[in-house]
Image (spheres, grey):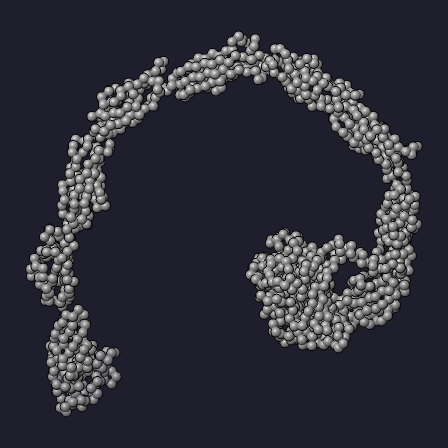
């Protein structure tokens, strides 16, 4: 039997090479699927402490500032390429969609994820933030946890990362499993008691902070839901988070399992338990959220918590959960966490059928992976070692019919429903496929066997001769003779073997020889090629390559007709017609030469000169030049030809090569003679033309014809290819023309020289028009030519009337004309005008004073006055209204010397100055403004810093309008203008205002009488604001406007009142105290509803009434009272009384005890 484990390991290695989807960098493991990518930290959390490889898709979110400690490198850093896990949600590429990159299911750059474990109350944690160093190294663990990434595996489209660690005696093995085609991954955790005593109260917690798509939205908030909590359909436990906002609506993250020991939780404070123990979390005594359907929209953590219970020494238990990155994968992801079959380490699902022949099993070991939290029962018991437990062993040879087993699991805790699984075994036939067919090879060649079949079968080949390994599926076959090979596949489970065969025909190699290794020919000349093959007498197939220019590529002796010069190597491949794979080869080189080329074109030369020819062609060819006269050498590829006389010559070149026709070419030479050089000179003025003839003597149009070329040519030369033409130079100066007379032959030309001096056709003089001062000398400078004759007109004031450059000194303004002459040229003229200007004098009137703040008009008088072109400049100009006028206005404030400069345009000038002395203008002052009460007066004093007189305006209320200190007694507001005049006549004005306030006024009654017990409230009429009463006796308050007076004796009160401006007034009131009493009644009244419409008695000084009675005209008492404050309302016995006269009688006692009686009539009006 073959070693099945070795064979399987070979297959796994091959698969790993083909699908390198996982790798380890430093202490981190990276798993890469088609849609999901994961970074595993050294503490088993998801969040690498190193940047992900370049083909991954990390995406650091904004606001992430953690530095992560890399235990392997011993450094802390932050990188946008740190990776937790990401997903291509739409399975359409990492850059497709809106937005294109979905996958920030929690931060790939600074992930918040991890796990915790509690054993007998001792709790340890492994969270990614534990790598946040804050400048301090960290292992990523708290408590007694330890561990590291151990390995990675790639096999059959499945990538795995294996982490191994421990907490004390509890061994922990975490395997992250990624199906590279799915949008979820699972985590299998195996817990093993490596100690000698039981480990009790074991709890496990896995948590993640789902910041879904935070890298797109910048928002850490998610919508978090307890989707499933036990008991639930299908025993599901699931907590999920969904992104919110425009960029995250499809960002789904689920953390779930089908494990009866698990609970899903949401917690709204931090990532880790935050000091809350795992038993409290599982037993729901914490503030975590557990209720199925609960939803919380916030930046929170989600997780799964397990109650593992007790693990005996040497025993293990496992748990599996899934990270789901697309809601469409919830079912398949959760199914991947439930218990599954392990048959001889291969995974199978419920309902699978296993063909024992195909898998070549001897003994079948069946176990329920991740199923330790169920009690399992197996049925039927046939071939089983036990009907209870998580595993069974079956002998494969004993199963000779179809056998289906039912495995039922009952949850230990009762939190889950009972589950049932089915697994079927068959002992059936199998088949293999042989892809090789009957074929032929030559001796020494090999063929790779190609068999496809179940990998766990045993294979054997016969015969074994020429087989590289006769017991493997696909050996290499190298027979020396024709052989039929048979391959047989066998199964150790008792299934019948299967055989396949095919035949390899072996032949001898053909030997090919050529008549010659090299064949020579010329372009277009056919030549045969001969191939001889042995052994003779065997039908052969021929193939020539390349087929270029061959008459046939499939015969032994083709004819080649080369189309171009050069070497071509032909290869002939020969094989027996019955066995195409057995071949022989040979080569032959065909060497071809072509025609030669005379590269030198036909020539025209001057007599006595030579031509060196250049020929391109094969050096293998023989060359001959005829005639040979004047040719050196006549058999050369580069001869030199020197004709001896004038005329035309033809030379023939012949090239010869064996077995090829001659190649013939001709070369022609024309020989010319040299002309005679000529020299021509002339002088003209600009704009004139000259006729020139430089024809070569003795030449004509047919004999010794010459071609002429003028340089420079047109447009100055009328016809620059004629020997006789007209030349019109465009500028002054000496013009040189070279006329080249050339025959047909090159290098046989002669140059004629034509020199023409061109004089200017105009003169200039400077200055043209200028101004000078009388008596000034002017230098005239002109441009012309030394060959010209000059004449100035008029000659007055000219030093040299026949010189172009001379001096001029006229007495008056004048216009000069100068004439230039040269034979053959028209006369030339220029003019010069001189404006002779006078030398002026100026006077501004001498020094003078100026009052401060006044202005001064100044006139500059200039002589001679007849000239009107004077220019004025005053300095300094700051205080002038105009600094360029003859008349200016000065308004300066300091002593100033004014200077005026008078010039003509020619610069003739004069100056004068005047000192302006500034007299004070601000010398007067006056006392401050004052305020008056009516009839007040004040002495108002004005003063000056210089001696001055004064004038007051207006003069009203002023004692003296010319005084510096008059008495002012105004009766109304008045503003005065005071003008002070200094001895220099300068005036200064000041202003003074007298404000007259309103007079004080107060008025009170002259007197008032008070009876016993009465007071008087004084109400004055006044405009005053403060008051003083005297005497104060009998007043309630003596300093207010309206006190109440109640003196014991008659008193005269005097009040002094003052306005707010201090103006005062006095008045008095005499308060008379009367010790008597009065009792008065009205003589008519009108009854009504008001109290005031009653008939009352008016009293003063009364103590009380004895009676008050009213009688009608019949003597009846219609009203009676003793209350002095009660009056009659006009009714009797409740009835209104009629209009008429009624009689009253009243008696009272005064305060001093006197009885007062009063009787009278009252008229009742209605």
Q: Which residue sits at x=88%, y=31%?
A: 532
Which residue is at a point 12% across and 51% down the rendered structure image?
986
Residue 716 pos. (x, y %)? 45, 18
Q: For residue 389, which quarter of the picture?
A: bottom right
- Please state, as top left, top right, bottom left or bottom right, where the C terminus lies in the image: bottom left
Q: In this view, does 64 lie to the left or right of 482?
A: left
Is residue 355 positioned above or below 1025 on the image?
above
- 670 lies above or below 1017: above
Image coords of residue 890 (percent x, y): 18, 45
Of residues 374 and 317, the one drawn nearer to the viewer in this rendering: 317
Residue nearest the viewer, comparing 660 with 122? 660
- Of residue 577 and residue 149, the one placed in the foreground of this image is 149
Residue 1151 shows in the view: yes
**Quadrant assignment for the N terminus:** bottom right
Q: Quadrant of residue 1050?
A: bottom left
Left or right of residue 340, residue 1039 in this image? left
Residue 1152 in the image, given as x and y percentages of width and height:
14, 90
Q: In this view, does 653 lie above or below 416?
A: above
Residue drawn at point x = 10 percent, y = 67 percent: 936
**At x 13% / y 72%, what residue is drawn?**
1065
The picture places residue 1026, in percent across and down from the top left corner, at 18, 74
């Amino acid at each position: 039997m073959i070693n099945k484990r070795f064979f399987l390991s070979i297959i796994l290695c091959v698969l790993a090479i083909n699908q390198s989807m996982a790798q380890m960098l430093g202490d981190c493991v990276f798993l890469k699927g088609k849609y999901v990518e994961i970074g595993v930290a050294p503490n088993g959390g998801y969040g690498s402490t190193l940047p992900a490889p370049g083909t991954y898709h990390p995406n650091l979110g904004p606001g992430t500032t953690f530095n992560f400690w890399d235990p392997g490198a011993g450094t802390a850093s932050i990188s946008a390429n740190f990776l937790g896990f990401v997903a291509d949600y739409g399975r359409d590429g990492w850059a497709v969609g809106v937005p294109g990159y979905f996958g920030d299911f929690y931060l790939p750059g600074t992930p918040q994820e991890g796990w915790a474990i509690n054993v007998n109350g001792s709790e340890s944690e492994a969270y990614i933030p534990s790598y946040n160093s804050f400048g301090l190294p960290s292992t990523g663990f708290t408590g007694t946890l330890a561990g590291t990434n151990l390995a990675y595996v790639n096999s059959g489209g499945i990538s795995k990362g294996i982490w191994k660690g421990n907490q004390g005696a509890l061994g922990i093995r975490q395997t992250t499993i990624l199906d590279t085609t799915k949008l979820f991954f699972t985590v299998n955790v195996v817990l093993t008691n490596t100690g000698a005593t039981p480990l009790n109260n074991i709890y496990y917690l896995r948590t993640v902070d789902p910041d879904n798509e935070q890298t797109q939205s910048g928002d850490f908030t998610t919508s978090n839901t307890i989707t499933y909590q036990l008991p639930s359909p299908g025993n599901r436990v699931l907590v999920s988070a969904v992104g919110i906002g425009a960029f995250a609506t499809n960002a789904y993250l689920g953390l779930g399992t089908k494990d009866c020991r698990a609970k899903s939780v949401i917690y709204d404070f931090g990532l880790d338990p935050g000091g809350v123990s795992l038993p409290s979390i599982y037993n729901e005594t914490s503030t975590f959220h557990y209720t199925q359907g609960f939803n919380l929209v916030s930046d929170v953590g989600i997780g799964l918590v397990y109650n593992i219970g007790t693990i005996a020494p040497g025993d293990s238990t496992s748990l599996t959960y899934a990270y789901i990155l697309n809601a469409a994968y919830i079912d398949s992801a959760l199914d991947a966490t439930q218990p599954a079959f392990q048959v001889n380490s291969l995974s199978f699902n419920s309902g699978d059928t296993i063909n024992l022949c195909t898998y070549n099993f001897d003994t079948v070991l069946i176990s329920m992976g991740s199923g330790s939290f169920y009690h399992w029962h197996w049925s039927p018991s046939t071939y089983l070692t036990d009907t209870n437990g998580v595993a069974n062993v079956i002998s494969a040879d004993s199963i000779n019919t179809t056998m289906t087993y039912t495995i039922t699991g009952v949850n230990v805790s009762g939190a889950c429903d009972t589950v049932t699984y089915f697994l079927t075994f068959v002992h059936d036939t199998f088949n293999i496929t042989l892809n090789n067919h009957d074929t032929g090879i030559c001796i020494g060649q090999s063929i790779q066997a190609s068999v496809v079949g179940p990998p766990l079968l045993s294979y054997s080949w016969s015969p074994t001769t020429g087989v590289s390994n006769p017991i493997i599926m696909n050996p290499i076959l190298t027979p020396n003779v024709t052989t039929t090979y048979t391959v047989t596949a066998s199964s150790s489970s008792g299934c019948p073997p299967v055989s396949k065969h095919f035949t390899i025909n072996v032949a001898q190699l053909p030997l090919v020889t050529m008549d010659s290794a090299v064949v020579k020919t010329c372009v277009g000349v056919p030549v045969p090629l001969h191939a001889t093959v042995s052994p003779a007498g065997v039908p052969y197939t021929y193939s020539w390559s390349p087929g270029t220019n061959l008459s046939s590529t499939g015969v032994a002796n083709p004819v080649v007709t080369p189309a171009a010069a050069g070497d071509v190597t032909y290869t002939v491949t020969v094989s027996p017609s019955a066995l195409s794979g057995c071949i022989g080869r040979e080569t032959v080189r065909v060497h071809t030469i072509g025609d030669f080329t005379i590269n030198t074109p036909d020539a025209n030369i001057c007599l006595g000169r030579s031509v060196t020819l250049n020929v391109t062609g094969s050096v293998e060819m023989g060359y001959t030049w005829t005639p040979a006269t004047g040719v050196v050498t006549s058999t050369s590829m580069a001869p030199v030809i020197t004709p001896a006389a004038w005329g035309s010559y033809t030379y023939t070149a012949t090239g010869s090569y064996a077995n090829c026709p001659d190649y013939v070419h001709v070369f022609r030479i024309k020989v010319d003679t040299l002309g005679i050089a000529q020299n021509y000179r002339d002088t003209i003025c600009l704009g004139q033309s000259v006729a020139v003839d430089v024809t070569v003597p003795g030449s004509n149009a047919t004999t010794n014809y010459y071609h002429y070329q003028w340089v420079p040519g047109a447009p100055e030369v009328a016809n620059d290819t004629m020997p006789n033409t007209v030349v019109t130079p465009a500028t002054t100066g000496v013009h040189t023309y070279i006329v080249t007379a050339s025959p047909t032959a090159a290098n046989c030309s002669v140059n004629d020289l034509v020199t023409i001096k061109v004089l200017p056709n105009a003169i200039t003089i400077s200055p043209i028009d200028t101004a000078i001062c009388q008596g000034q000398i002017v230098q005239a400078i002109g441009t012309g030519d030394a060959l010209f004759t000059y004449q100035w007109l008029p000659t007055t004031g000219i030093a040299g009337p026949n010189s172009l450059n001379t001096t001029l000194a006229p007495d008056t303004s004048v216009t000069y004309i100068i004439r230039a002459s040269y034979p053959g040229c028209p006369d030339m003229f220029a003019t010069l005008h001189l404006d002779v200007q006078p030398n002026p004098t100026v006077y501004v009137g001498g020094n003078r004073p100026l009052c401060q703040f006044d202005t001064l008009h100044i006139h500059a008088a200039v002589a001679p006055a007849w000239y009107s072109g004077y220019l004025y400049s005053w300095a300094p100009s700051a205080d002038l209204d105009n600094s360029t006028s003859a008349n200016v206005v000065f308004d300066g404030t300091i002593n100033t010397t004014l200077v005026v400069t008078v010039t003509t345009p020619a610069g003739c000038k004069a100056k004068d100055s005047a000192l302006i002395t500034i007299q004070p203008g601000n010398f007067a002052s006056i006392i401050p403004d004052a305020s008056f009460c009516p009839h007040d007066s004040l002495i108002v004093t004005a003063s000056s810093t210089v001696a001055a007189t004064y004038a007051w305006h207006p003069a009203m209320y002023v004692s003296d309008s010319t005084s510096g200190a008059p008495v002012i007694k105004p009766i109304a507001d008045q503003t005065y203008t005071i003008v002070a005049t200094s001895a220099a006549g300068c005036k200064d004005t000041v202003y003074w205002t007298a404000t007259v306030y309103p007079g004080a006024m107060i008025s009170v009654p002259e007197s008032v009488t008070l009876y016993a017990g009465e007071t008087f409230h004084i109400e004055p009429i006044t405009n005053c604001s403060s008051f003083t009463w005297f005497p104060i006796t009998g007043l309630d308050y003596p300093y207010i406007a309206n006190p109440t007076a109640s003196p014991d004796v008659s008193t005269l009160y005097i009040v002094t009142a003052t306005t707010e401006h201090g103006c005062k007034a006095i008045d008095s009131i005499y308060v008379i105290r009367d010790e008597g009493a009065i009792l008065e009644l009205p003589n008519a009244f009108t009854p009504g509803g008001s109290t005031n419409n009653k008939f009352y008695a008016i009293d003063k000084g009364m103590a009380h009434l004895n009676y008050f009675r009213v009688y009608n005209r019949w003597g009846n008492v219609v009203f009676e009272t003793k209350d002095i404050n009660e009056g009659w309302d006009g009714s009797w016995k409740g009835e209104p009384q009629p209009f008429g006269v009624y009689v009253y009688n009243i008696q009272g006692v005064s305060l001093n005890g006197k009885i007062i009686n009063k009787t009278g009539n009252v008229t009742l009006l209605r």
